[in-house]
Image (cartoon, rainbow, N blue to C red):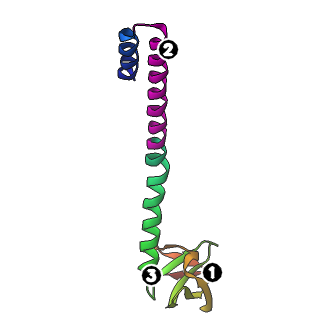
Amino acid sequence: MDWIFGITRALAETAATPEDMQAANATGSLVSMVVMIVLMVAVFYFMLIRPQRKKDKQVKAMLAALKPGDRITTIGGIYGTIKSIKDDTITLLVGQDRMEMVVARWAIRGVEEVTVENDGETLA
């Protein structure tokens, strides 16, 4: 930030009249305000927008890679095994009785890679 204030001081020193000094100070404050706004936008981009886009890309790739036989968890906390996939709907086999349940593709939270116990039965 010192270089911005250095520009302001340099403009003020070269000014011959008080009107020129006021104009130089206004220019310097405008430049520093623009720099601060650019810095805030950069911080928001790198702290909020970029990580969210990366996460969205990973979720989209996970949903595209789903296949029958995968163990998944829904956003409602239901564990199941994918029986079939048709467009935007997925048929799951749920519970000890292997009941069928149809859910939307976007409702899949993640693919399970660990063994899950469900009603006394160990599912892999």
- First in sequence, mark 1 or 3: give its number: 3
9 up-or-down from 4: above or below: above
Mark in the foreground, 1 or 3: 3
Q: Is residue 113 at all visible to an observer of this figure?
A: no
| Three-letter amino acid code at the position of disc 2 | Gln
The residue depicted at 50 percent of the width and 50 percent of the height is 48
Residues at marks 3 and 2 touching, judged by CB atoms closer than 8 Å: no
Residue 62: where, in percent of width, then height? 44, 74
Q: Percent from the top left, x then y, of residue 17?
A: 44, 7
Q: CA distance from mark 1 to mark 2?
A: 78 Å
**Could you tell me which secondary element the residue under label 2 belongs to?**
helix
Q: Give the mark nearer the N terminus: 1 vs 2.
A: 2
What kind of residue is marked 3?
Answer: Leu
Residue at mark 1 to residue at mark 3: CA–CA distance: 25 Å
The residue identified by callout 2 is 22
What kind of element bears circle 1?
loop
Return the disc, 3 or 2, that comes first in the chain's sequence: 2
Packing grade of label 1 (10 A; few <14, some 14-19, many >=20) is: few
Q: Which residue is mark 3?
A: 66
Q: Quadrant of residue 108?
A: bottom right
What amino acid is at disc 1? Asp
Query: As displayed, is residue 29 above or below residue 81?
Result: above
Q: Is residue 25 magenta?
A: yes
The residue range painted magenta reads: 16-42
Sort mark 2 into few (<14), some (14-19) or many (20+) by Cα contacts within 10 Å. some
Camera-side mark, 3 or 2: 2
